[in-house]
Amino acid sequence: MIANHILRSHMFTAGLSEKQLDCLAELAREVTFQEGELILVDGQRSTCFYLLVEGSVAVELAAPRFTVCVQSLGPGQAFGWSALLDHQDTLFQVRARERTLALRLDGAELACECHKDPVLGAEILRRTLYVVAGRVKATELRFAEMCGVRTETLPGQGCP
């Protein structure tokens, strides 16, 4: 199974047990996005969690008159964390920057598995909190730049 092989080497799932990886592999579906394709739209109901395998995406804040890239993500990173929450709308839009391959996990199915296996649930929660914290930090840095505050952008925090 290709998803199982990918999960074993993905940064988000590194260190999970064989049983946990097998469980996630059952839920995972490979998806491909083309350059410029909108993957997540802010304000729409979140349903899927994504693990990037190849390519890159831009996490954006969209307003009626402008769009600001908050963070670029590449292989080994994850997005779509709001799909793990009940009835949560997407807070950022995500757009493929190039042809991109990802594993898509249905948020409701993943949440169900996390409830069945509390150890898996705790690990997914802990790892997802790192994703959320990274997004908050990237947003903070982008707003500081917009306000004229000089910042040092670290890899994966900004958009080139």
Image (spheres, rainbow, N blue to C red):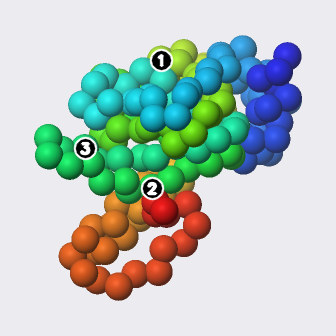
Q: CA distance from mark 1 to mark 3?
A: 26 Å
At label 3, the amino acid type is: Ala
User: Which is in the foreground here, disc 1 or disc 3?
Assistant: 3
The residue under label 1 is: 108
At label 1, the amino acid type is: Ala
Q: How many numbered marks does the figure carry?
A: 3
Q: Could you say whether the residue bearing mark 1 is in a helix, strand or loop?
A: helix
Mark 1 and mark 3 lie on one chain; the one further toward the N terminus is: 3
Residue 129, image x, y percentages: 49, 50
Q: Residue at x 52, y 42 (%)?
A: 97
Q: Is residue 56 visible?
A: yes
Q: Which residue is the extreme one toward the left?
A: 64
Seen in the picture, residue 159 relative to 77 is either above or below; the reply is: below
Q: CA distance from mark 2 to mark 1?
A: 26 Å
The residue under label 3 is: 62
Residue 36, image x, y percentages: 45, 35
